[in-house]
Amino acid sequence: VAAFTMGIRRLQGNLGGLDGSRGLSVIMRYTLRLLTIQQFQRATALLCAMEVLRRDKLEVWGEEPFSIGLWVGQRVTPNTTDESHDAIVAARDGQRPTMSSPAQLTFCPWCGAEIVETRDIEVKRYNNDVGRTIIYCGDKYDCDFRRSATDSLGLPVIVVDEEIYRRPPSMLIATVDKFAMMAWRGQVRTLFGKVSEECTRHGLLWPGAECTGTHNKKGNLPSVGVRKIIPIRPPDLIIQDEFHLISGPLGTMVGLYETVVDELSTWSIDGKSIRPKVIASTATVRKAAEQVNNVFLRKVAIFPPHGLDVEDNFFSVQRSVKDKPGRLYMGICSLGSSRPAVLIRVYVALLTAAQSLFEHFGLVADPYMSVVGYFNSLRELGGMRRLAEDDVQTRAFRVQMSDVNRPGLSQRRVRNVDELTSRVSNKEIPKKLDQLEVKFKPAWEKGETQAIDIVLATNMLSVGVDINRIGLMVVNGQPKNTAEYIQATSRIGRFFPGLVCTVLTWSRPRDLSHYETFEHYHATFYKHIEAQSVTPFAPRALDRGLTGAMVSLMRLETEAMTPNSGAQTLESSGQDEALMVRNIVSNRAWKVNDKIVKSTTDNMAADRIDRWVKEAIRPGRRLGYETERGQGDLTALLKKPGALAWDEFTVPMSLREVEPGVQLVMDDAKLEDAPVWHAKVKLSRSEGGVA
């Protein structure tokens, strides 16, 4: 669908006075960084194929390359080309990575050759070049995207925020919380086609851009100037993957900011408004119509539709377990035993049994040589990691050293214990995913990447992570949501029969209840999926997100208000921009909820505009959205969360910042002196007994 959307946009060309031969066409949004990065790697292969086809028929698809962008947090990818340059220099100097990195691809998505960060990434800085971070394929001879065959374009990927704004990609992979930056970065307007000028060297320009558009000749770069362009068509398609995660506080904020995205992506032709198409995908959802209405303000059309036969609706076929083995769930509950003791024995039994199968059947048993441990909290995972690196390793190696006969179990050396959690750095995530695909061998050569024996994970693994060779999972306790349980356990057994061992604790009433109804629950667990709560126009949600949505809409829609100094241009509550934003947010609230909510939203929007106007017309100072270095007389309108108490103009920089954080500071000056008492120390008889 995404490829068709990007292709038909190029074929349509200019419609309604908007240029469709370039610009952002498809937005794919995710909620977790692990899922975002993995989907980016997959989608890049699609864009490589489209780019190869475009080069063969330039007269059909145009001169503008098909490309894909990664728009995520600052801790993952650089914000500027200079930051990208510093990251590559640090990597070449062998420094430990402490910053974001443009190295988000470890292998070429087109040919599979390895991409080495220090060799295959070139940063052409803004001041003395075109301002691009280019990633080449590591293959020097055959790949279409090698350094010598791409006219210095490399792979069609853009991973630096500044470069995404200057050269909007055809497809954008993003996290939902990144859209909070619409209020803080006026240059985001280029993603929605709100441009009129371009620098032929550096890309699109926006009000307040550093690039003047006029540059003298430098080396091989010709002299260039600013050229006028027609506005670009906004995005045509928004894909929201894992829609069941758009719930709770995050889903509420997404629904509120969706007001802005929907408005900026709407255009008209012959007097008819064209809104972007929305595809929301999930396998675990209840009350989908209500959730879609609250987030996207659209009606639901379920695909694939229901057919006459539940096992065959033309678009999809339900396969029998006999034809394609699925997953087998096993419940384990040992009365009177502690949870760590049970987990140790379960892990040892699975690891050594898999070793026995591997010795008898070889690579056929490979899917069961890596055990995935799923945990509901980092605290429980941390305790199990210590046990896995100590007790589990020892017991697995000594499983046949006792007098007890243990048939079906073989001695095993557990070498690699790893984890997939929020504690893993962004740079390490792609490497760990690649290592999980490494198959087991009877012996390993020195320096060879070895397969992982045990990988411990939290809910980071529960959505969208597809590792084909994994067939064994141990779930520690019943997860809080049935949807999470289904999603997490469905990571295994995709290509091979899978075994899920759910270890339930007898001292937890909820775990014990699930164990007692284990068979019935698993036979019907899709009907136990919980409905998600999304309330974008609730009073407390408006307290947290209304200002950010209003600022985003006015700043990106109005050219005069785009630069940082544009905050001062709002001089009257009756100004067109103020009336426009009040009308949009209040009407959205009315359509999502009712007239009472519309009135509340309109009143809150009016109060914020009145305060904004008062700040803008205050004499003796200049007003900006935020302070700037070297601009001491510039007063910030917006406040960042955590710096000061939350008020009407505190705007989150992430849609997850819905609650203020609490900082704990230890005051050494107020610590009490050491106690006067001393612990008793046992002395030997020669030293006089007990002291």
Image (cartoon, rainbow, N blue to C red):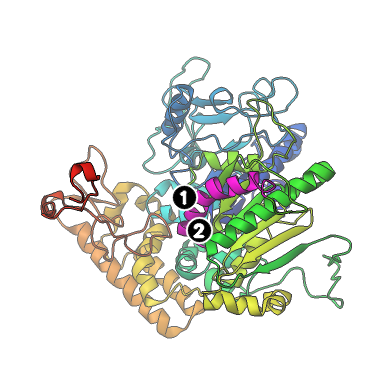
Give the image location of residue 42, x and y in percent: 67, 45
Give the image location of residue 204, x and y in percent: 49, 39
Q: Is residue 639 magenta?
A: no
Mark linked to residue 456? none
Q: CA distance from mark 1 to mark 2?
A: 8 Å
The type of residue carrying mark 1 is Arg
Give the image location of residue 570, x and y in percent: 29, 59
Name the residue carrying label 2. 264
Main SS of residues in magenta: helix
Which part of the image, by quadrant, shows the N terminus? Answer: bottom right
Q: Is residue 429 left or right of residue 664?
A: right
Kind of element beneath mark 1? helix
Q: Are marks 1 and 2 in contact (CB under 8 Å)?
A: yes
Q: Is residue 305 left or right of residue 132?
A: right
Kind of element beneath mark 2? helix
Q: Residue at x 50, y 60 (%)?
A: 261
In depth, the one of 199 and 481 nearer the eye is 481
Q: How many marks?
A: 2
Name the residue carrying label 1. 189
Which stretch appears magenta? Answer: 375-402
Image height of 328 relative to 335, above or below: above
Q: Please report whichever mark, 1 or 2, sits nearer to the chain's N-terminal start.
A: 1
In depth, the one of 467 and 287 nearer the eye is 467
Q: Residues within 10 Å of mark 2 (few under 14, many from 20)?
A: many
Q: Farthest residue to the front: give it.
A: 686
Image height of 252 relative to 385, above or below: below
Q: Residue at x 47, y 75 (%)?
A: 535
Q: Is residue 553 left or right of residue 427?
A: left
Q: Is residue 605 left or right of residue 667?
A: right
Could one spot residue 477 in this view of the protein?
A: yes
Q: Residue at x 41, y 36 (%)?
A: 98
The answer to which image quadrant residue 207 occupies is top left
